Image (spheres, helix red, strand yellow):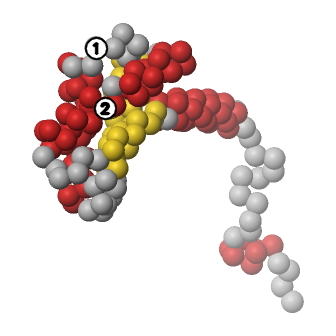
Amino acid sequence: MSDHPRARKLGERIHEIVARMLDTRVKDPRLGFVTVTEVRVTGDLQHATVFYTVLGDEEERAASAAALESAKGLIRSEVGRQTGVRLTPTLEFTLDAVPETAAHLEAALAEAAARDAELARARANAAYAGEADPYRKPAEREADEPEE
């Protein structure tokens, strides 16, 4: 989001409006289970990027993207009516990659945990190759050294 407080507030308001519109007013059968994750508004309040996720496979994502594109005008007019800003920002719907990234990170963390557990099992049965403490202590050095 932008550093501008007004853009942040407008983004939050657009988030609410779009989520409500997708839930109640947009009746496109292609629209799947869509969740609006974030809305970013430019500093000049002229453009809003709406990030969304779709529960389902690639085909459902493509169908939902087409449904959002066809309902963009209806949603934009409702955003303009409910926000009351002088110039209604243009809307751009962008598929959010957060679920795929989260799944990838979860898989990487699970693999790291499995490797850590394997290393802990190997460490439990390990023994030192030589002495446990191979370094001489000052007291030992005095006893081992011949006197001159």
Please say whether residue 102 is visible from this viewpoint: no
User: Which residue of the protein is positioned furthest toward the bottom in this rendering?
Assistant: 148
Please say whether residue 8 is visible from this viewpoint: yes
Between 52 and 64, which is closer to the camera in this rendering? Answer: 64
Is residue 23 left or right of 34 when viewed as pictured?
A: left
Is residue 123 left or right of 84 when viewed as pictured?
A: right
Above or below, comparing residue 64 to residue 108 in the picture? above
Q: In which quarter of the image is residue 91?
A: top left
Disc 1 target residue: 27
Nearer mark to the viewer, of 1 and 2: 2
- Classify mark 1: residues with Cα within 10 Å, few (<14), some (14-19) or many (20+): few
Q: In which quarter of the image is residue 116?
A: top right
> Quick one: SS at disc 1?
loop
- As measured in the structure, the alpha-carbon distance from the residue carrying label 1 to the one carrying label 2 is 14 Å
Is residue 30 left or right of 44 when viewed as pictured?
A: right
Give the residue at x 77% y 53%. Answer: 131
Disc 2 target residue: 73
The picture places residue 43, in percent across and down from the top left corner, at 31, 60
